[in-house]
Structure formats: C-alpha cells, structure tokens
Image: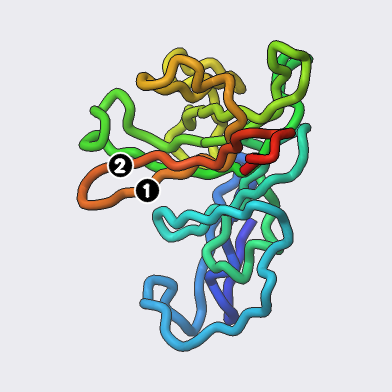
Amino acid sequence: WHVNVRAGSLGRLSELSGKGAAASQITFDSFDPEAEAEGEIEFKNPIRRGPDPWITYWEGYYYYTATMGAERLLVWKAPNLTDLHRTIPKTVYVPQDETDFKGLWSPELHYFSASDFGPEHEGWYLYLAGNRKNAEGNAMPVMFVMKSLDGKPDGQYGHPVTGEPNKYISIDSCADIDFTRIWAVGQTIVRINGKIYSLFVTEEGRKTPDFV
C-alpha cells in the first residue's frame, strides 16, 4: 500500500499499520511532518466522559483512563487531548476469575525511574481500587497495583514481581499490619521536595455518629 498525506493535521494520524509482503511507504506533500507545531487549538469540554478520569503525558502522547465498571480496564492514547474521544482504547487489565475484584475504581498511571526505587522497579505502574469481600462477607474497596509488562503506559499489565499477566498485588503498609483490611480507594502519587508520597481516600466510623 501507499499512503500520500497531502494536507490536514498530522497530529490526528496517531497510528498506521498493515500486513503484506509488498513494500509500503508513506509520503508527505506541502508540509514538513517534523516541524514544530504552532498556533492554537479549540476544544469543547468534556473531552471524554467518564468518572475518576486520569491523564498522563509520555513521549508525545496523552494517555487517558477512568472508572468504567468491573469487566475490564481501558486506556486511550492520542497525540492531542481533543482526540481522546476519537481513538480506539486498548484493554490493559481483565479480571480472571470469581476471586478477583468485582469493581474497578479510580485507575491511575504512574512512572517510576531507576533513581526512584532502583533499576529493577523502573517502569509504568497501574494503581486501582477494587471491591473485595471482607471477613464479614461484605464488599469493601481496597487498593492494588500492577506493572506494565512491555514498558508502555497502555501495555499489558501484570504482577510487579513475577511478571504474570493480569495479576496484581495488594498495596500494603509497613507501619500498619491491618492496612489491607481498611476501606481505601483513590490512591495517587505526589512528589514534594524530592520525596515521593502516597495518598488515598478512606473512611472511619461508618454507621456511627462520628462517621467521616
């Protein structure tokens, strides 16, 4: 095949692929695809609909995810924020069996470099909250994490240690042995003065006058 790009916004050509033995090529007329973008862009909110949205930017692309139910987690990739509603998402995590979480809340994508926690932990991480039954048999949201297995924000995610696809580990605390038993969602990462902090949402005193 031969694709000839004559005009328009190259930023909207986010991916092009094909198969075949014949030689293929793409050519550009009348403009330089390597030229720095100039001018203004108009957009109308919302750029995508979905609760708990999260966007990160990496190597020329925006990556978007959001809470979307219990069956799977999706990530959208686009060169412009205004194109996120046009792109086709990739599935990055699918619960495997009845023992997995029943709800997937507040996904976030975070990158840690070798200087953060060592070269063995460098890469993209996916933080999630999910509903899991507690000792009383009630559904309770807890937090867990997975790591990208191919080094990309929209890649397949799996166990951060073993590399097994679609497997996660629960987020624990060295200071609180009961941390995995508390109501917890919305984990995020904050960097302040060269240090990395983890924040999350919890609750105390449910069904009591002091509930917060």
**Disc 1 target residue:** 190
> x, y percentage for residue 176?
42, 20
Q: Is residue 38 left or right of residue 117?
A: right
Picture quadrant of residue 118:
top left
Examine the rendered structure and indicate whether residue 11 appears above or below residue 94.
below
Q: Is residue 137 left or right of residue 151?
A: right
User: Is residue 125 something one can see in this rendering?
Assistant: yes
Q: Between residues 211 and 201, which one lies in front from this camera angle? A: 211
> x, y percentage for residue 113?
29, 39
- At horizontal 34% and vertical 41% (from top left) the residue drawn is 197
- At horizontal 40% and vertical 39% (from top left) the residue drawn is 198
The numbered mark, 2 or 1, whose residue comes first in the sequence reads 1
Tag 1: amino acid: Val
- At horizontal 50% and vertical 87% (from top left) the residue drawn is 40
Tag 2: amino acid: Ile
**Disc 2 target residue:** 196
Label placed on residue 169? none
